[in-house]
Image: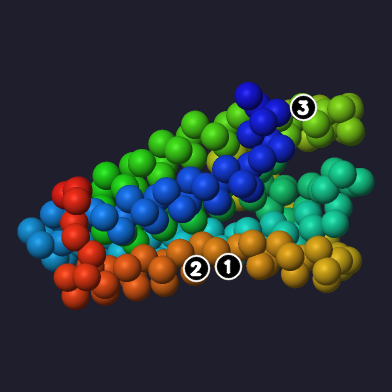
Amino acid sequence: MTRFLTDYRTRISQFVGALFVLLYTVSGKLLPAEHAALSGALFLLGCILVGAGAVGRIWCAQYIAGYKNGVLVREGPYSICRNPLYFFSLLGCIGVGLCTESLVLTLLLGALYALEYPLVIRSEEARLSRLFGAEYGQYVREVPRFLPDLSLYHEPVDYVVKPKVFRHAVRDVMWFIFAVGILECIEGIQEAGLIPALLQLY
């Protein structure tokens, strides 16, 4: 199961994303009608988290793109936690959920993340342990697995970035931002009465 998630993580995420958009498309939201201020606050917080997640993933890509299997990266975001890419993915994921202005859909996205990514992280850790041995063991002892410890932060004066790989990584990050735009377009279509609400969700 873990190997399957690792090998097909991108495809699985795309499939889950498509199902999520479909669910959102046929769902009416009860919360905005009853609590407009709370609805707006959820959307604002969602946009902030999507922005933080996107910027954070680009920051990670700056360090890891093109170095994933050849070097144990411990600089920048990788100095404060061992899986910053997945940490920022969580922020973006929760942000997209909040942008739906539905607590149910937000919790659903969070639950899907919690089911998939711990297994992916364990698989990544096993791979890094095989590749880097004692060096990775020391990294594990010194740096937290998921939640960042800002007191550990350090960065190099200079760092070589591989543009082609970095560009592809940035392209992947843009889907967090595109998702918010897609949700807003769907909401406009819903408000125009062109799509029936088959479900009512808070």
Residue found 87% across the figure and 44% down from its top: 69
x, y (%) of residue 2? 65, 27
Tell me if residue 1 comes above or below residue 193 in the rendering. Answer: above
Residue lying farthest to the left in this orientation: 34
Q: Residue at x 82, y 28 (%)?
A: 129
Q: Which residue is mark 3?
A: 126
Q: Is 64 left or right of 30, judged from the image as shown?
A: right
Most extreme residue toward the right is 70
Of callouts 3 and 1, the N-terminal one: 3
Q: Residue at x 58, y 31 (%)?
A: 118
Which amino acid, mark 3?
Ala
Q: Which residue is mark 2?
A: 177
Q: Are marks 1 and 2 in contact (CB under 8 Å)?
A: yes
Quarter occupied by the N terminus: top right
Looking at the rendered structure, the kind of residue marked 1 is Met
Badge 1 is on which residue?
174
Distance from Cα at disc 1 to Cα at disc 2 = 5 Å
Quadrant of residue 155 within the rendered picture: bottom right
- Name the spot of residue 103 as percent of width and height, x first: 26, 48
